[in-house]
Amino acid sequence: MAISGLDQELDARRLENAMWRSWMQEQASSNKAAGPPSQPSDNTEGKLQRVRSSIGDHIDFSQIRYPQEKRSCRYDDLPTFPPRPNFAAFENALRPASQCVVYDGCPEDPYHPSNTPIYQTATFVQPSSSEFGPYDYTRSGNPTRTALEKHVAMLEHAAAAFAFSSGMAALHTVTRLLKQGDDILVNEDIYGGMHRLLTQDCKHSGIQVRFVDTTNLDAVAKAILPTTRIIHTESPSNPRMRITDLRALAKLAHQKGVLLSVDSTMMPPVICQPLLLGVDIVVHSATKFFSGHADCTGGLVCVRDPELAHRVAFLQNAEGTALAPFECFLFLRGIKTMWLRVSRAQENAQEIAKFLSRHPKVTGVFFPGPGGCDNRALRIHQSQSSGPGCVISFTTGSVGFSRRLLDASRLFKTTVSFGSVNSLGEMPCTMSHASIPAEQQTLPQDLVRLSVGIEDVRDLLLDLQRALETASGQREQPSNDQYDSRFEDLPVVPRLPGAIAEETDGHDDPSGLQRSDSLVGFLAAQAQQKRPGLALLGVAAVSVLTLGALAAARSQRRCAGFIAGFGFDVTVMVRSILLRGFDQDIANMIGQYMQKHGVNFAREMVPSKFEKTADGKVKVFVKDAEYGVFDTVLVAIGRTGLASQLNVEAAGLSYNPKTGKVVVDDNDQTSVPNIFAIGDVCEGKPELTPVAIQAGRMLTRRLFAGSTKKMDYTDIATTVFTPIEYGCVGYSEDEAREKISKDRIKVYHCTAQPLEWNLNSERKDDMGYMKLIVDKEEKEKVVGVHILGPNAGEIIQGLSVAIRCGVTKEHFDDCVGIHPTYAESYTTMTEEKTEGSALPTKGGC
């Protein structure tokens, strides 16, 4: 192969690749069966000299690499690629916290990265068709996975460790070590997913599955059969936290020629290393403590015997259950903080276990620490583990009480799994262990399992105390949009439970009415039960049905419109006027439009009470007189400032006791010079999310970037997403007359039909409406713009910029409209509105 005419800019790496290809071709043509020599041939050296003379001496040719020896490889060895080092006899002087952090996952990488990179590739190029590198296909092996498996093997003192796509994939691989006719003994208190795998999969494969109390060694000894191949247990067990003596059980198993497998997910290697106790196989759901952040799923199998490692490696490769490189990277990152996370969570868990064990509403605590198990079990656990872990289970004596407790908690999020930095809670019988048939369930139905996180334990204890009080009826159930507490009063995302609202037992709502925490749940429930009747009640302030700060009346009308669009019979109760604070001409048009399209309005009415009828409907009363019976009632409730509950007086902050909001100046500064406030908490500021974002951005620039620009709270555009969309910026007509002067104000208006309505048979008779409010003494400067029609929000956003720039009516008149658009009517608007005049008429766009 001639290498001549190389470009002067050829770098060392490209040159190296070119020389490699040239040299390999020479070896192939010379038929040297013994493989390449250890040094370049004379011919190759001659080529190097020619290249050196052509491009100069600035490249260090000594760095060019050549293969030193030919690899030999048998295909039956491929499943064990890459070779797993034996860590069983490895004495690491580092302590567990350091072992988690001090680890070089890629010592052979020529770039020496400080962290293991993600080798995101499916295949690896081989030296030749007859030679194999350490990796060929990511299913069989990947450098990122090797790094993870080596690190786990070191932490667990294993001969080898294997990473799988999930904890269940790891457990399944253990069962695949069995063949038809084999017997497996399993702890009777086992994870629900493993119970399902054993009883519904293994039995169908001809494997005999039997359950036994592994805490009772005599029972285990009697249960072992000649066909028993594996004993599988958990210690502590999930979820009753029962303790098995792993040393004694391993000794018994080995006397009978049986392997002992332990699911040690509850006890990560920074707490316990079961292989050092004689266990043969250790399984982890790495999703828990190895990740620590509940952001990836994975499983681990660690083995003590190299021969067993070959069998597991074969299954991992043959069945394609290995963990992907990106997830391997996440677990490698999680391991670095595992000791810190587990240590903090254990400290919290011990305090919470003490608290629960003393609480009169708690009937039993299950926890491998003081107060959570008997002395014998505690001694066994402490002899084989350095800590109690972070999971606590307890009973209350009432399924309803347990449910209310979990629902009332705001820090223990209701979800399956454990081992996260966040505290979690669940009811195993209906969640993590729900796959176990009812007739085989041995768990108490009222059992609650908590996974304790790394939050401040004082907050966790206070949250539990208040949840217990709420479940007992001593405290009102907290609303879904804010904390009912003093640490506290922080807004939270509304809970989104199952789509169908659950029937309460009468404790959650004094009226015994059915409640749904999400509009999705309401709609699904109505569809399932085929309920057509609906009452929608509104008061002035903020709706819990939407995120952000919108007036309740706005959300009420919006919800009424789209619920009616689903075919429900909707009635809206209005306390006084529609859309208080908005232009009343347009508010009334919205009401007329909604009535025309199927929404009923009951004006100047406020419900006084509700009663649930025998058939599950709701009877609504106005001034204690029956108004009507409805299938469902939705209430748009108001938002109230809670500054008074924050004890702001102690800090010297001024607030409005009527609204509960903090008083600030035009610099967003409170009465205390070093305390600032933005958003809905501020007195007299618009309750709109974008307003709070902009105010926060500008405040940050003033405080830290030397800016002097203040937030301008005037002329802020907004949109009401009623069935016919309404957008506005600036004054309403009434506000303009009040704040400027009736004599100075002139109003231009017009009606127009959007083109898309003209083509819609259901809307061909509907008209949109536009209004410009101008100040005559300021050259008809526009002080208010209003639009009713499709895409009003999109249009008003652009017009709001013009308003802030001081646009006048003349500017609108001089502007060339885009035809045929709805917004072009602003450029042709000539009719002035006079008192008592009818709406103008106009054709389509």
Image (spheres, rainbow, N blue to C red):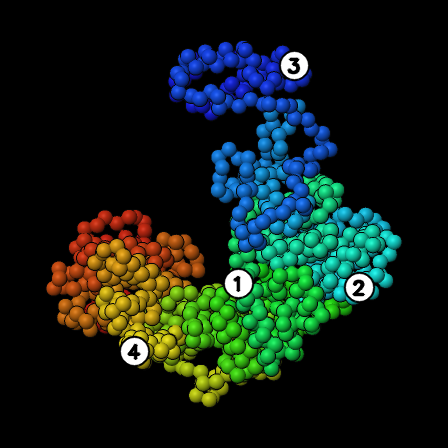
* Of the two numbered discs 2 and 3 in the rendering, the one whose residue sits closer to the viewer: 2
Q: Earlier in the sequence, mark 1 or mark 3?
A: 3
Spatial CA distance of label 2 from label 4 is 69 Å
Determine the residue positioned at 68% across, 26% down.
72
Q: Earlier in the sequence, mark 2 or mark 3?
A: 3
Amino acid type at image mark 2: Leu
Amino acid type at image mark 3: Lys
* Of the two numbered discs 1 and 3 in the rendering, the one whose residue sits closer to the viewer: 1
Determine the residue positioned at 45% across, 70% down.
481
Secondary structure at badge 4 equals strand
Spatial CA distance of label 4 from label 1 is 41 Å
Q: Quadrant of residue 829?
A: bottom left
Secondary structure at badge 1 equals helix
Spatial CA distance of label 1 from label 2 is 34 Å
Label 3 sits on residue: 32
Q: Earlier in the sequence, mark 4 or mark 1?
A: 1
* Of the two numbered discs 3 and 4 in the rendering, the one whose residue sits closer to the viewer: 3
Question: As drawn, which residue projects farthest toward the right?
Answer: 226
Between 412 and 590, the residue placed more toward the observer is: 412
Label 4 sits on residue: 656
Label 1 sits on residue: 344
Label 2 sits on residue: 217
Determine the residue positioned at 51% across, 33% down.
110
Query: Where is 63 relative to 755, above or below?
Result: above
Picture coordinates of residue 29, whole percent (x, y): 62, 12
532 relative position to 540: left or right: right
Residues at discs 4 and 1 in contact (Cβ within 8 Å) = no
Task: Judge the density around disc 1: few (<14), some (14-19), many (≥20) Cα neighbours within 10 Å.
Answer: some
